Image: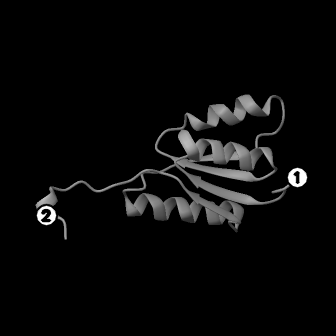
């Protein structure tokens, strides 16, 4: 398997590009750490895995909150000790009136 024994962290893993990248990495042997605000992404891995052991772990996070992100990073480091692949696919933006942008 292309990514056997690797650990991948994917933000925005519950939908869209993040979900598809996470599934692709998982199908090629990577253990995936799924970061998102809701855990619906886990269903795809349980379903795709059939009866196999699912090499996926969900970490709830709001990437707009620094403390949330730091806590998840700590948890991932404690559990997996390393990250081989990092994919940042979560959509985040700051909204402001045009005249207030610097």
- Closer to the camera, 50 or 101? 101
- Residue highlighted by disc 1: 1
Name the quadrant of the C terminus.
Answer: bottom left
* Point 63% across, 66% down: residue: 77
What kind of element bears circle 1? loop
Q: Residue 32 location, x and y as percent?
A: 69, 51
* Point 40% across, 62% down: residue: 67
What kind of element bears circle 2? helix
- Closer to the camera, 75 or 5? 5
- Residue highlighted by disc 2: 100
The CA distance from mark 2 to mark 1 is 50 Å
Disc 2 crowd, CA 10 A, few/some/many (<14, 14-19, 20+): few
Q: Residue 74 location, x and y as percent?
A: 56, 65
Q: Is residue 78 left or right of residue 15?
A: right
Q: Classify residue 85 by image quadrant.
A: bottom right
Disc 1 crowd, CA 10 A, few/some/many (<14, 14-19, 20+): few
Is residue 89 positioned above or below 85 on the image? above
* Point 28% across, 56% down: residue: 94
Q: In this view, does 46 lie to the left or right of 35?
A: right
């Amino acid at each position: 398997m292309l990514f056997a024994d690797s650990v991948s962290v994917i933000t925005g893993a519950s939908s869209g590009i993040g979900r598809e990248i996470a599934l692709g990495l998982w199908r090629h042997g990577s253990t995936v750490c799924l970061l998102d605000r809701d855990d619906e992404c886990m269903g795809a891995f349980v379903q795709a895995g059939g009866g196999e052991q699912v090499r996926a772990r969900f970490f709830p996070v709001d990437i707009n909150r620094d403390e949330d992100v730091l806590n998840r990073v700590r948890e991932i480091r404690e559990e997996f000790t390393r990250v081989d692949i990092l994919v940042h696919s979560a959509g985040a933006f700051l909204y402001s009136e045009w005249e207030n942008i610097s």
